[in-house]
Amino acid sequence: MIRIAVDAMGSDRGPDEIVAGALEARADGIEPILFGDPSIDPRGLELHETTSVIEMDERPAEAVRAKPGSSLVQSVRAVAEGKADAVVSAGNTGAMLAAGLLELRRIPGVLRPAIAVPIPARRGTSVLLDCGANADARPEHLLQFAAMGSVFAEEILDLQNPEVRLLSIGEEPEKGNQLTLEAHELLAASDLNFKGNTEGRDILEGASDVVVTDGFTGNVTLKLLEGTILSLFGALRTEIAATATGKLGGLLIRPAARRLRHRLDPDTFGGAYLLGLRGLVVIAHGNSSRTAIANAIRLAARGVEHDVVGRLAARLPSEAPTG
């Protein structure tokens, strides 16, 4: 049985929502292990009591060093010590990165870990990375992000020889800032299935199996996509409810709207892999529902089953990192 360490204190919705999601995932034969305050009702799940919580507004590196007994750090340490196969947290993303680097360390040869987010594109799921682990990046980092994203696409999305594109302000290779221009050259010279640049407007259409960018641009893009989807569905509900004709039409399109919402809902995947570490880390949204937490735990279990960490280590150059 796959054991997943779960930070029960990380969610904006409180530990009860995390516990409910963990129970839902356990029904699929996964063994969630909770890390959190002794006052939590684990509802039959294994609970490791912790002494503190890293809050969302704390400085990540400082908080990880100052609170080694926190639920976040202890859940990551469980993976480092072999007591769990992967970890899931909806807590402070920066602290998860800091704890991962401290407790798990990077795979040999990895320059920077990257957050890889599945995108429910019209032509099928793709992966966008980096989505926030590195606000600043160099061209060689983007090259490695593309390589890690390709492994993700093969192992988790079941795509053969995944296509890679670079997020830029135009499809032409001469468009972009200095980072994208230099990254384009490196990607074009690599053995990846690189097909050139893509623009943000094409991401939800299925611009590529793997879309690579720096963490600042990736995080802005991800939040823009999430916000746009939520706003459009909200506006559609308002318009449907405004008139009797709209309400009638709403009844007719309800099945299609539900299918579309399910496909575009971030809760469907529930989380994102932090790729490049020696252990498997899944980061969930701070406002994750129990459904999202359950799916994040399932995503972590799938990564364990497919040995994503081992396959990344085998596919990436093992020379010492230089940045």
Image (tube, rainbow, N blue to C red):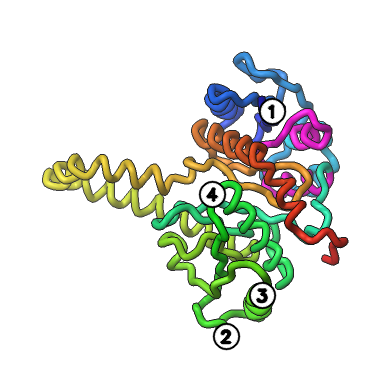
- Quickly name the residue at label 1: 3
Task: Give the residue displayed 75% in from the left and 22% down from the top.
Answer: 48
Instruction: Please determine whether, in this image, residue 320 is positioned above or below residue 268.
Output: below
Mark with earlier residue (3, 4): 4
Counting other residues with Cα less than 10 Å from the Cα at mark 1, is it few (<14), some (14-19), or many (20 or more)?
Answer: many
Counting other residues with Cα less than 10 Å from the Cα at mark 2, is it few (<14), some (14-19), or many (20 or more)?
Answer: few
Which of the labelled discs sits on residue 157, or is there none? Answer: 4
Task: Give the residue displayed 76% in from the left and 37% down from the top.
Answer: 76
Mark with earlier residue (3, 1): 1
Q: Amino acid at mark 4?
A: Leu
Magenta part, dominant SS: helix
Tell me where residue 309 appears, x and y as whole percent: 72, 46
Tell me where residue 231 appears, x and y as whole percent: 38, 53
In this view, the residue farthest toward the front is 160
Look at the numbered disc 1 and give the secondary structure of its residue: strand
- Quickly name the residue at label 3: 183
